[in-house]
C-alpha cells in the first residue's frame, strides 16, 4: 500500500506557481490577483477561505476577500461580481459555496467572467471540460488528476467508480476521467446497492461527507482509493469517507483525509489563478 501524499505534491506545485508569479512580475510588472466572495459565517467555509488567502500570500498573489452577511441580497453580490469582472487587477473570482437559500446560485455563477472563473463553475467552462477543450477545471477533481499523474497511475480502461454527483466534485471528476479514457460509473444518494458497484471498481473516488461509508468488504484487492470527503467526528477529529485503517490494507494506493486531496484543491486554485493571469496578460499584449 502506498499513500498518495497530496500535501507533499501541493507544496511542489506551490513552488512552481511562485516561480511563475516571479516570471510574470519580471516580464510584465503584473501581480496575479484573486477575489474571494464569502457569504455568512459557516465555520467550514470561513476556514477554507482563510486557507486560500494564506496560500495566495505564500505565492505572492494580490488577494481581496469580500465578506458579506448571511442576509445579503442577490443584487449586492451581483454588483460585487460585476465590479470584480471589470477590475483589471483581478484575474480570478471565487464565490465560496454554498450560498444562502435566498440567493440564486446559478445566476451568480453565470455572472462571473468565464476568463476569471478559476473555480471552473461557469457553464461555459463546464461545457469546455465536457467536450475536452482547454478551460478552467474545478480545483478538487483537477487536483485528483494531478495526484494520480504524480504517482504514474494510469486510468485508461480502468473501472472508475465515483461516489457523489455534485457539480463541484463528482460530475467534473467523471468528465476528467472520461477524457482520460477511463470507464466511469457515478453513484449517488439514490444508488441501489452501492457495494455492488464499488466491488467492481479498480479505482474509487468518494466525496460525500459520510464517515466510514467505504468499508473493507466493499472493495476488491489492490483498489486505488481517492477520499475526497471531510467530516468532523463528535470528538472534533477531521476524517474522510473511507475506513482508512481497514481499507488501506487492501489498497494499492490510498489518499489520507485530511492531507490527501484537500491541499491539492488549494494548489489547483493557485495554479488556475496564475493561468488566468498569464492568459489575461497575453490578451493585452
Ligand atoms: N465549496 C466547497 N468546495 C468548494 C470549492 O472548491 N470552491 C468553492 N468556491 N466553494 C466550495
Image (cartoon, rainbow, N blue to C red):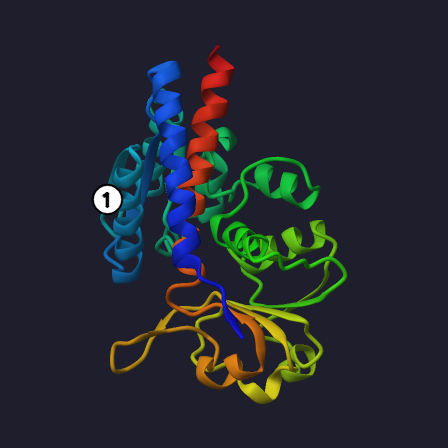
Which quadrant of the figure has residue 77? Answer: top left
Residue 225 locus on image (x, y percent): 56, 71
Residue depicted at 52% across the width and 55% down the height? 147
128 over 180 or under it: above or below: above
Which quadrant of the figure has residue 177? Answer: bottom right
Question: 244 or 152: nearer the eye?
Answer: 152
Which quadrant of the figure has residue 155? Answer: bottom right
Instruction: Judge from the rendering whether residue 132 lies leftward or rightward of residue 67; answer left or right.
Output: right
Ligand 1 within 8 A of label 1's CB?
no
Residue 216 locus on image (x, y percent): 56, 86
Question: 175 or 222: nearer the eye?
Answer: 222
21 over 71 or under it: above or below: above
Mark 1 residue crowding within 10 angstroms, few (<14) / some (14–19) / many (20+): few
Question: 181 or 93: nearer the eye?
Answer: 181
Q: At numbered mark 1, what does the secondary structure look like: helix, strand or loop?
A: strand
Looking at the image, can residue 193 be seen?
no
Residue 150 locus on image (x, y percent): 54, 53
Residue depicted at 23% across the width and 56% down the height? 41
Mark 1 lies on residue: 67
207 over 156 or under it: above or below: below
Instruction: Judge from the rendering whether residue 167 lies leftward or rightward of residue 99; answer left or right.
Output: right
Instruction: Judge from the rendering whether residue 36 lies leftward or rightward of residue 195; answer left or right.
Output: left
Residue depicted at 37% across the width and 52% down the height? 99
Amino acid at each position: 500500500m502506498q499513500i498518495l501524499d497530496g500535501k507533499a505534491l501541493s507544496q511542489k506545485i506551490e513552488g512552481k506557481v511562485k516561480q511563475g508569479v516571479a516570471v510574470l512580475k519580471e516580464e510584465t510588472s503584473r501581480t496575479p490577483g484573486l477575489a474571494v466572495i464569502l457569504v455568512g459565517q459557516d465555520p467550514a467555509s470561513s476556514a477554507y477561505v482563510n486557507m486560500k488567502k494564506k496560500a495566495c500570500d505564500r505565492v505572492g498573489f494580490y488577494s481581496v476577500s469580500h465578506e458579506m452577511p448571511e442576509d445579503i441580497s442577490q443584487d449586492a453580490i451581483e454588483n460585487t461580481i460585476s465590479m470584480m469582472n471589470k477590475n483589471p487587477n483581478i484575474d480570478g473570482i471565487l464565490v465560496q459555496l454554498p450560498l444562502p437559500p435566498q440567493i440564486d446560485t446559478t445566476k451568480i455563477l453565470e455572472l462571473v467572467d468565464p476568463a476569471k472563473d478559476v473555480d471552473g463553475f461557469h457553464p461555459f467552462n463546464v461545457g469546455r471540460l465536457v467536450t475536452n477543450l482547454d478551460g478552467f477545471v474545478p480545483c478538487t477533481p483537477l487536483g485528483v488528476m494531478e495526484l494520480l499523474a504524480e504517482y504514474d497511475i494510469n486510468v485508461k480502461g480502468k473501472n472508475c467508480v465515483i461516489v457523489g454527483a455534485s457539480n463541484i466534485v463528482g460530475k467534473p471528476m467523471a468528465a476528467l476521467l472520461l477524457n482520460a479514457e477511463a470507464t466511469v460509473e457515478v453513484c449517488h444518494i439514490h444508488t441501489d446497492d452501492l457495494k455492488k458497484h464499488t466491488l467492481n471498481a479498480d479505482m474509487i473516488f468518494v466525496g460525500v461527507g459520510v464517515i466510514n461509508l467505504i468499508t473493507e468488504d466493499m472493495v476488491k484487492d489492490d483498489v486505488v482509493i481517492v477520499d475526497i470527503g471531510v467530516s468532523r467526528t463528535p470528538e472534533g477529529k477531521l476524517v474522510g469517507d473511507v475506513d482508512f485503517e481497514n481499507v488501506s490494507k487492501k489498497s494499492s494506493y490510498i489518499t489520507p483525509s485530511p492531507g490527501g486531496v484537500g491541499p491539492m484543491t488549494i494548489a489547483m486554485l493557485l495554479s488556475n489563478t496564475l493561468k488566468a493571469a498569464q492568459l489575461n496578460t497575453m490578451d493585452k499584449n
